Image: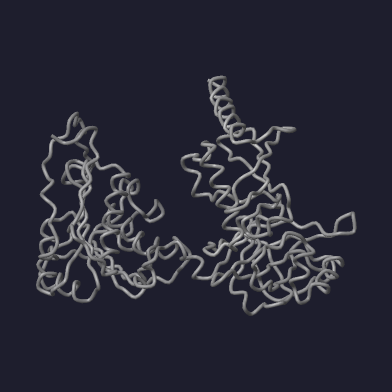
């Protein structure tokens, strides 16, 4: 197997090298040297193929360093930064013609000054990475501008910024000391300690503090356009009379950083309120997804208690067994992502009357029904119709083979989803499941289809709350061994 793999890699390498030769490149000491177009002129380059080519991309260096200005589009070793991480999917550089054309475009864009440059905040890649995996955490740095600060060790191999402070005596065992500096707007990335010192207003003084072993960690703020970044460095004097500089892994703990990945609708959703009726398997995970998307006020409605058998498909864990499901989910939400800004109202009840359903619909921006109770869904749908609003209803059908979500009632401009109940699946041999104390068979739905149903439900809920146009009032996904007959 390994021999066949190595043979395939060698074949790709040989084909690429033949292409370079046809393009006029010449091999010298394992480097291919040749010329590429530069938009009316030419550029001399050196191409180096790594051992794992084509899984690792070729590296290209300008033959004349002075002919190419330094920019964010150069690697730490001087190679051209040709390929972003998201462009690695199909190994397109295996084609010599496409690759050399891409190199030519790089030179043209460099000569134009990168007018459409993407402001990646990756300044740390220009410094050697530290082998210390401790995560350095910091909050709002505005109050520490150009100031000496103290870090303390905390759980999970973290080092947390605690406040102002400077080292006194042999105090590194409990605390680490650092400096918060301002590099300003960067058009060219600094690549050495000398570059850093030149950019800092207190660079010389800071260097003396590092030499005196009073400071070790530097958090250096910088901007690229409208974006703000932080470069964290571990700086120590070396035996050659200079400084050893390594980048460290760090992260902000401010709210915007912790919710950055919540999605583009978070600022809208954080002003919305949601009620989730039925917080069993689907409802509990829907509540979690809605909270993570930005919902800050949520009412949970369910009359059931969390049992040990529920946990395998439920958001709440074994520690919450015996609690009402609404309380178990509320406690889990408040501690799950560290934001702690969500207001959860648990209601141990079931919707059995029209006035209860109408009150719930009127008091919230959206009601999400995951009750798996036909009468409850019908009441909520009627209440939404009476209030001139819509609800989102998510469920699992066909013995755990179908995940479905509906917007109810559908508007005139929305196409309802056809009935998907009672379908027969090929090779449908899912057994009936029974549990002591249950009046009806347990649903055979697996955890992954529960997750799928919750994802569909929360997606349509977010779209409605964000007032996005929705043409189809729902979605159905079948997960059978074969298509249903």
Across and down, in percent, residue 23 comes to: 59, 36
Q: In this orientation, which residue lies closer to the viewer: 448 or 27? A: 27
Colouring: one colour
On screen, residue 334 versus residue 307, left or right, reads right
Q: Is residue 209 above or below residue 318?
A: below
Rendered-image quadrant of the C terminus: top left
Across and down, in percent, residue 93 comes to: 53, 40
Q: Quadrant of residue 342?
A: bottom left
What residue is drawn where x is 74% and y is 68%?
Answer: 178
Q: In this orientation, which residue lies closer to the viewer: 325 or 235? A: 235
Across and down, in percent, residue 214 comes to: 82, 68
Q: Is residue 77 above or below residue 289?
A: above
Q: In this orientation, which residue lies closer to the viewer: 180 or 65? A: 65
What residue is drawn where x is 23% and y is 59%?
Answer: 278
The number of numbered discs placed on residues in the rendered structure image is: 0
What residue is drawn where x is 54% and y is 72%?
Answer: 226
Name of the residue lying farthest toward the front: 40
On screen, residue 324 versus residue 227, left or right, reads left
Q: Quadrant of residue 53?
A: top right
Across and down, in percent, residue 126 comes to: 68, 56
On screen, residue 9 versus residue 326, left or right, reads right
What residue is drawn where x is 90% and y is 55%?
Answer: 240
């Amino acid at each position: 197997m390994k021999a066949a793999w190595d043979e395939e890699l060698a074949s790709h390498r040989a084909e690429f090298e033949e292409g370079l030769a046809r393009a006029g490149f010449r091999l010298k000491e394992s480097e291919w040297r040749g010329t590429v177009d530069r938009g009316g002129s030419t550029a001399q380059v050196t191409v180096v193929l790594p051992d794992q080519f084509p899984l690792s991309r070729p590296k290209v260096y300008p033959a004349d360093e002075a002919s190419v200005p330094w920019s964010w589009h150069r690697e730490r070793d001087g190679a051209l930064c040709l390929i972003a991480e998201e462009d690695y999917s199909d190994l397109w550089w295996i084609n010599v013609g496409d690759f050399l054309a891409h190199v030519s475009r790089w030179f043209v864009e460099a000569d134009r000054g990168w007018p459409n440059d993407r402001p990646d905040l990756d300044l740390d890649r220009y410094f050697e990475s530290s082998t210390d995996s401790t995560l350095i955490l910091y909050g709002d740095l505005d109050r520490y501008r150009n100031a000496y600060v103290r870090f303390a060790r905390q759980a999970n191999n973290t080092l947390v910024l605690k406040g102002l402070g400077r080292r006194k005596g042999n105090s590194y065992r409990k605390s680490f000391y650092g400096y918060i500096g301002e590099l300003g707007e960067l058009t060219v990335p600094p690549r050495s300690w000398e570059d850093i010192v030149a950019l800092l207003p207190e660079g010389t003084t800071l260097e003396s503090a590092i030499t005196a072993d009073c400071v070790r960690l530097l958090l250096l703020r910088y901007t690229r356009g409208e974006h703000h970044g932080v470069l964290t460095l571990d700086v120590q004097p070396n035996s050659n009379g200079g400084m050893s500089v390594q980048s460290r892994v760090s992260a902000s703990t401010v709210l915007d950083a912790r919710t950055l990945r919540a999605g583009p609708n978070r600022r809208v959703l954080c002003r919305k309120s949601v009620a989730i009726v039925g917080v069993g398997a689907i409802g509990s995970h829907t509540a979690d997804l809605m909270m993570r998307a930005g919902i800050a006020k949520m009412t949970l409605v369910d009359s059931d208690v969390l049992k040990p058998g529920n946990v395998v498909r439920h958001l709440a864990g074994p520690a919450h067994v015996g609690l009402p499901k609404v309380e178990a989910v509320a406690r889990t939400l408040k501690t799950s992502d560290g934001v702690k800004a969500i207001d959860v109202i648990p209601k141990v009840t079931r919707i059995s009357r029209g006035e209860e359903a109408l009150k719930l619909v009127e008091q919230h921006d959206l009601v999400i029904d995951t009750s798996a109770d036909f009468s409850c869904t019908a009441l909520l749908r009627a209440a939404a119709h009476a209030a001139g609003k819509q609800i989102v209803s998510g469920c699992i059908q066909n013995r755990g083979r179908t995940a479905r979500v509906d917007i109810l009632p559908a508007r005139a401009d929305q196409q309802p989803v056809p009935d998907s109940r009672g379908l027969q699946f090929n090779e449908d041999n899912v057994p009936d499941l029974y549990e002591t104390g249950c009046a009806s068979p347990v649903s055979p739905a697996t955890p992954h289809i529960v997750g799928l149903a919750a994802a569909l439900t929360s997606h349509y809920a977010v779209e409605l709350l964000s007032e996005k146009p929705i043409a189809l009032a729902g979605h159905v996904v079948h997960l059978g061994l074969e298509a249903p007959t």
